[in-house]
Amino acid sequence: MNIVLFEQEEVVHGCAVLSFRDSRFCHIRRVLKLSAGACFKAGIINGVKGSARISLATEKYLVAVFEKLEYEDCALFPLHLVIGFPRPIQLRRILRDVSSLGISSIHLVGTELGERSYLDSGLAHMEKMHTYLIRGLEQAGGTKLPLITVSESVRTFCSQHTHILGDSTHQKLILDTKNTLTDLGSAALRGDVLWIAIGSERGWTESERLLFSAMGFRAVDMGRRTLRTETAACAACAVVLANAHAWKRKIPRPGKRSSPISRKNPQIRITLKK
């Protein structure tokens, strides 16, 4: 955890209270070994970041006072992942890791070859997904959450995003093992927005390939090796971010405070209708 994040509602008059049952309390007191008067990196989810000072610390709770919350987090990179709904353990890793990479959105879709039980699992609920997205931000030291949606099928996803995917300035790629003309690393990245579709553990069916093709997705591969979904997701993000020079250093500047957000993440949307 490289930053301690708070929901806007947790901060009252510039202060927040953490109970000993809160994992953030445990990190501050037992891992960082901080006591009253010490400062730590802090931020508001989807808002600004800076530092907070511990004004009071006991074995049961601590009070943090936000002193310098003046820096806006870096803008999310305009990369959007479409992922065949994976096993719950894989999904936890994907949400955490791609959130830490700073991409704009994650779209989880049910697939014809995927297990229906994965889509029906408790992890598909927004609160649980929210938790793993935040873990990625805590690792990266960021504050901005990616958008996340859940659709029951590829057809549902395509019909709901026709107005976005139909934009000719968006480049759309589908990772596949069939009918690919080039690899992801060699694909010419053009346009300001990039979409990458990654299948679940059994891949795509022909009908799903046709749906993506109709939306303008071009098939590319990542070599001859067959990768796990979570490996392919992280590797694809890394290739695109590196090729786009997204990791060039930038000097943070004081920014305007962001508006509050609700505890229920407004960037999570779940749709389970065909």
Image: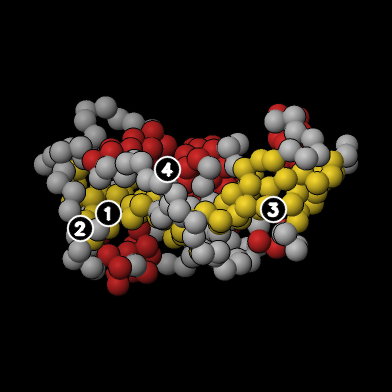
Q: CA distance from mark 3 to mark 1?
A: 37 Å
Which mark, residue 66?
3
Alpha carbon of mark 1 to alpha carbon of mark 2: how far? Answer: 7 Å
Q: CA distance from mark 4 to mark 2?
A: 20 Å
Would you say the residues marked 4 and 3 are in contact, meaning their CB atoms lie under 8 Å apart? no
Q: Which residue is mark 2?
A: 191
Cα separation, mark 2 vs mark 3, equals 40 Å
**x%, y% of residue 185?**
20, 37
Q: Residue at x 19, y 43 (%)?
A: 220
Q: Nearer the viewer, residue 253 or 117?
A: 253
**Who is closer to the viewer here, 239 or 8?**
8
Q: Are marks 2 and 3 in contact (CB under 8 Å)?
A: no
- Secondary structure beneath label 1: strand
Secondary element under disc 4, as helix, strand or loop, is: helix
Evaluate whether residue 206 shows in this view.
no
Q: Nearer the viewer, mark 1 or mark 2?
A: 2
Q: CA distance from mark 1 to mark 4?
A: 15 Å
Among the 4 quarters of the image, the one containing residue 165:
bottom left
Q: If you read the primary sequence from the N terminus, does the residue marked by circle 1 or circle 4 appear first?
A: 4
- Look at mark 1 in the image and give the residue it sits on: 194
- Closer to the chain start, of discs 3 and 1, is 3
Q: Amino acid at mark 1?
A: Leu
Q: Who comes first in sequence, dot 4 or dot 3?
A: 3
User: Badge 4 is on which residue?
Assistant: 101
Secondary structure of the residue carrying numbered label 2: loop
- Between disc 1 and disc 4, the foreground one is 4
Q: Nearer the viewer, mark 4 or mark 3?
A: 3
Q: Assess disc 4: are there few (<14), some (14-19) or many (≥20) residues with their C-alpha within 10 Å of its C-alpha.
A: many
Residue shown at 74% from the left, 38% from the top: 38
